[in-house]
Image: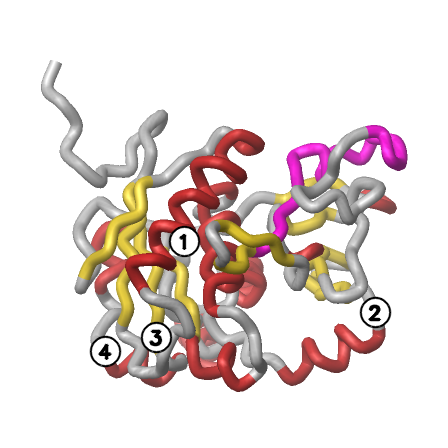
C-alpha cells in the first residue's frame, strides 16, 4: 500500500499545521522557539486529553493539503498579503493570529496561538455544538471559557483549555477535571475572563463570565474570529458556499439573495 503524502489531512492521520509568520511586528518570542513550545503543548498537554495530534512546521507560505497558522500584523496585512484565496483551494482549516492588536493589549502571542491550535484541532470546520444548560446549544470551543488562564511550556505562556467532560451536562460539580488548570468546577461554567457562544432563539449570542469581560469584549476586533464565522454559517442557505478565510458582507449577501428570487 502506498504511503500517504506528507501533510495530507485524511481521516485517522495527524494534520500538518504550517506556522507562517508574515508579521512585521515583533512576536515577543523567537519564532522557532515558539513553534517548538506549541508542538510540546500539543504532544504533552493537549493530545493526551483530546486524542488529537498535529505536526507543526515552520514555512514561508501555505501548501496544498496542509492546515495553516498565520501570524500577521492585523487583518489588513493579511488581506494585502494575498492569502485570501489560498485556503479556498483545498478547504483546509486556517487560523490567524493578529500580532499588533495582541501587543497593544499586552497579551501574549503564544497564548493566542495555542488557543487557535487547540480549537482548530477539536472543531476544524467550526460547526460542532453541545447541549448545555436550559437545553441551549453551546459552541464546541475548548478555550473560550478559560481563555485568559495560562500555563508555561518551556517558559512560554500557553492557553488553558477545557476537557471533554466540560461539554457533558450530566457531570456533577467537582466530579472530575473540567479544564487543564483545574479552574472550572462544573460543566459549561465560564470563568470571569471567559465567554461562550450560545444559540438562543435562533440567534448566536456571546455570554461573558463577568461585566468587565463584556465591556472588554465589545472593544475587541472580532473580524475573522471563529465565533464570527459560526454566526455567518448560521445565515447561509444549504446551497451557499463560503471562503473559510473571509466573511462576506451581510448586506451584500442579502442583496444577492433577493436578486435570485
Q: Which residue is mark 1?
A: 239
Total numbered badges shown on the rendered structure: 4
Spatial CA distance of label 3 from label 2 is 30 Å
Circles 4 and 2: CB atoms closer than 8 Å: no
Q: CA distance from mark 1 to mark 2?
A: 39 Å
Residue drawn where x is 57% and y is 80% of the image = 106
How many angstroms separate mark 1 from mark 3 (CA)? 32 Å
Task: Determine which residue is flagged by label 2.
Answer: 210
| Residue pointed to by mark 3 | 72
Query: Secondary structure beneath disc 1?
Result: loop
- Residue 80 horizontal/vertical position (percent): 25, 83
Residue drawn at (60%, 80%), measured in percent from left and top?
Answer: 220
Q: Residues within 10 Å of mark 1 (few under 14, many from 20)?
A: few
* Magenta-drawn stretch contains 65: no
Q: State which quadrant residue 164 falls in.
A: top right
Question: Badge 4: few (under 14), some or many (20 or more) residues near its Cα, within 10 Å?
Answer: few
- When asked about the image quadrant of residue 5, the answer is top left
Which numbered mark, 4 or 1, is in the foreground of this view? 4
Give the residues in magenta: 159-175
**Mark 4–mark 2 distance (CA, rounded to whole Å):** 37 Å
Whether residue 252 is visible to the viewer of this picture, yes or no, is: yes
* Position of residue 157 measured from the top left corner of the image (x, y, whole percent): 53, 59
Amino acid at each position: 500500500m502506498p504511503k500517504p503524502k506528507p501533510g495530507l489531512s485524511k481521516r485517522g492521520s495527524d494534520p500538518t499545521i504550517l506556522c507562517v509568520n508574515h508579521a512585521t511586528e515583533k512576536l515577543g518570542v523567537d519564532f522557532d522557539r515558539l513553534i517548538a513550545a506549541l508542538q510540546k503543548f500539543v504532544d504533552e498537554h493537549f493530545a493526551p486529553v483530546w486524542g488529537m495530534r498535529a505536526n507543526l512546521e515552520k514555512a514561508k507560505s501555505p501548501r496544498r493539503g496542509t492546515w495553516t497558522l498565520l501570524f500577521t500584523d492585523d487583518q489588513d496585512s493579511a488581506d494585502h498579503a494575498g492569502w485570501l484565496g489560498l485556503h479556498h483551494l483545498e478547504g483546509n482549516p486556517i487560523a490567524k493570529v493578529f500580532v499588533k492588536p495582541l501587543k497593544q493589549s499586552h497579551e501574549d502571542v503564544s497564548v493566542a496561538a495555542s488557543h487557535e491550535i487547540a480549537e482548530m484541532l477539536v472543531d476544524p470546520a467550526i460547526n460542532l455544538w453541545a447541549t448545555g444548560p436550559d437545553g441551549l446549544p453551546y459552541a464546541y470551543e475548548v478555550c473560550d471559557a478559560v481563555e485568559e488562564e495560562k500555563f508555561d511550556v518551556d517558559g512560554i505562556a500557553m492557553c488553558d483549555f477545557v476537557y471533554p467532560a466540560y461539554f457533558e451536562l450530566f457531570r456533577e460539580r467537582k466530579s472530575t477535571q473540567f479544564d487543564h488548570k483545574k479552574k472550572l468546577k462544573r460543566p459549561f461554567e465560564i470563568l470571569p475572563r471567559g465567554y461562550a457562544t450560545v444559540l438562543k432563539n435562533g440567534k448566536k449570542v456571546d455570554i461573558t463570565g463577568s461585566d468587565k469581560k463584556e465591556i472588554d469584549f465589545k472593544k475587541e476586533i472580532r473580524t475573522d474570529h471563529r465565533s464570527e464565522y459560526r454566526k455567518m454559517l448560521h445565515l447561509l442557505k444549504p446551497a451557499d458556499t463560503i471562503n473559510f478565510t473571509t466573511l462576506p458582507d451581510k448586506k451584500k449577501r442579502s442583496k444577492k439573495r433577493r436578486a435570485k428570487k
